[in-house]
Image (tube, rainbow, N blue to C red):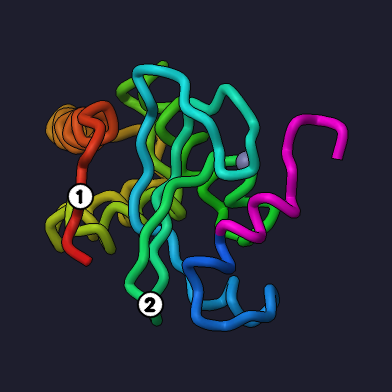
Amino acid sequence: MGDGHNFRQLRECILALSQASDWEVARKEWSLVDISEADEPDTCLCGHFPIIEICQIANRVTGRRTEVGNRCVKRFLGFRSDLIFAAIKRIRKDITKSLNADAIAFFNERGLLTSWECGFLQDTMSKRALSPAQSATRQRINEKVLAAISRRGFRGPD
Ligand SMILES: [Zn+2]
């Protein structure tokens, strides 16, 4: 591919952990279960180094798990983890900003958000002018999300 991402190598690694032997079927067995930012640069299954934005994926059929870089997860498995990482960058830069829909859905699914928090984030997602109390609540939730991401090994319920 010319940019250090070896799709054949990635595919072989993923196939070895899948039940299906056909790539198009095998990839459907996988889902995105966790994201994190590595303290130390890591190597993707495709051989690409360095990767910082790490996605943990799990196979629903075989129960196997593995880690892949954000780029490969988007490119080859079609998970929009890039949108979640974009939301993380946004709130890290400005804690008063809102998470986006992808991030809210992901962190809710991972059990990080309470159902009240999830509802609050959805209700206020596109609001620019929050009341002081709403703004404080948004920041508190954002800080919780950032803390979970920086703690490598954050694992929500499966
Ligand atoms: Zn890769």
Q: Position of residue 112 (x, y in %)?
A: 18, 51
Tell me the CA gap for discs 2 and 1: 19 Å
| Amino acid identity at mark 2 | Thr
Ligand 1 location (quadrant): top right
Mark 1 surroundings: few (<14), some (14-19) or many (≥20) residues within 10 A:
some
Residue at (22%, 39%) from the top-left corner?
A: 153
Residue at (23%, 60%) from the top-left corner?
A: 119
Q: Which residues are magenta?
A: 1-13
Badge nearest the viewer, 2 or 1? 2
Q: Position of residue 109 (x, y in %)?
A: 28, 63
* Residue 94 in view in this figure: no
Q: Is residue 133 left or right of residue 146?
A: left
Residue at (61%, 61%) from the top-left corner?
A: 77
Q: Position of residue 3 (x, y in %)?
A: 80, 30
- Location of the C terminus (image quadrant): bottom left
> Is residue 126 part of the magenta span, yes or no?
no
Q: Quadrant of residue 1?
A: top right
* Residue wearing tag 1: 155
| Amino acid identity at mark 1 | Arg
* Residue wearing tag 2: 62
